[in-house]
Amino acid sequence: MKICVLPGDGIGPEIIAEAVRVLQALDLKMEMEEALLGGCAVDATGDPYPVATQKLALAADAILLGAVGGPKWDSNPREQRPERGLLGIRKQLGLFANLRPAILYPELANASSLKPEVVAGLDILIVRELTGDIYFGQPRGIEMRNGERFGFNTMHYTESEIRRILRVAFDAARKRNRKVCSVDKMNVLECTQLWRDVATETGREYPDVELSHMLVDNAAMQLVKNPRQFDVMVTGNMFGDILSDEASMLTGSIGMLPSASLDANNKGLYEPSHGSAPDIAGKGVANPLATILSVAMMLRYTFANEVAARRVEDAVKKVLAQGLRTGDIYEAGMKKVGTREMGDAVLAAM
C-alpha cells in the first residue's frame, strides 16, 4: 500500500497527523511519503502542484489530503492559487467520481441546524462528477468587450462522461437502498438536458434501482425540507460542489464528513469535505474526525479492506458515544477536546 500524504494548508497538517496515526495503528503493510500541494507548495516552489508531487501521486495507490487554500494566496495570479493544485491533481489522475457521504450520528442530532426529527437517521451519499462541467470547460476567461470587462465560462459534458458517473451512482445504490436521484437544470440548460436523457437511458440498465430526477434548485430546497427522502444523489461538478456542502451541515458540522475522489480503477484521493480553516490553524482545536473517516473510505474503496474500514468507523462512533467533542460539535454536558486528544481517543477506541 503506497500512500502519498499531502498535509496542505491551514489546519491540514494537524488533522493529517491524526489520520496518519490511525493508519499506523492498523499495523498494515504500507509506505507513506509526504509532499506539497496548495499554498504551501506555492510558497516553496511557486507551483501549487509541483512536479515532485505529481510524480509521487502518480506512483501511489492512494492519496491522503488535508486541505488547501486560504486568504494569504487570494491575490496571487490564478495559476498560483492553491485551488489550482487541487484541480490539477484531480485532472491528472482522472479522479472523476467524488463520493461524499452525509451521515448523521445519533449522538450529534442536536448539533444539526435542523430539528432532530427531520434529520434523525440521515444517510445520504452524494456522487459528484469531478473532472468536467464548467470548472474545466473551454473557452473561459475575462476580456474587454465593447469597452467593458466581460467574464465567461463554458459548461459542457460528453455523453460518456455523464454515463460513467451515473454508473458509479447506480452501483453504489445497489449496495444501499436502491434509489438514485439525478439532479440537473434541464429546464434552462441544454447541457443538463443531455444529462437527464443519459440518466434515463442508463437507468434502464439497472431495473432494480429506482431512478428519479430533480431540478437543482428544488433539490437544494428538499435537502432542507425532507433530506431523508434521498439515498444516492448524483449530479455534475458545479451542482455537486454546492449540494454536498449544503448536505454536510445537515449532519451538524462539515468537520464530520469525509470524501473520496476515485478513478476508473478505484485509485483515490481522500480528504475531509471541509476547508483549511486558517482562522483556527495552529491552535490544536480542529476536528480530525472527517480526515480519520476519509482513511476508512480509503481502506474500503482503494484497498478493499472492509474489516479495517469498519474498525476505524466503529472507533469514531465509540468516541462520540463517550461524549467527546471538538468545538465545532460541542454541546453542553459533553467533554470538549482538542485535535490531538480526539486522535488519542480514536486510537484508544481502536
Image: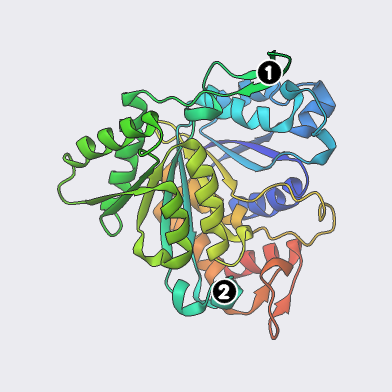
Answer with left or right where residue 127 lies relative to residue 243: left
Q: Quick check: 345 above or below 266?
A: below
- How crowded pointer 2 is (Cα within 10 Å; few <14, some 14-19, many 20+) is rated as many
- Badge 2 amino acid: Leu
In front of the other: label 2 or label 1? 2
Label at residue 108: 2
Return the residue found at the far front. 146
Q: Quick check: 192 above or below 282?
A: above
Q: Quadrant of residue 187?
A: top left
Q: Position of residue 59 (x, y in %)?
A: 55, 24
Tell me if residue 25 can be seen: no
Badge 2 or badge 1: first in the primary sequence: 1
Q: Position of residue 232 (x, y in %)?
A: 36, 53
Residue at left offset 35%, top offset 64%: 229
Label at residue 223: none
Q: Nearer the viewer, residue 271 or 241?
A: 241
Query: Residue at label 1?
Result: 51
Q: Nearer the viewer, residue 140 or 232?
A: 140
Q: Quadrant of residue 77?
A: top right
- Badge 1 amino acid: Val
- How crowded pointer 1 is (Cα within 10 Å; few <14, some 14-19, many 20+) is rated as few
Residue at left offset 59%, top offset 19%: 140
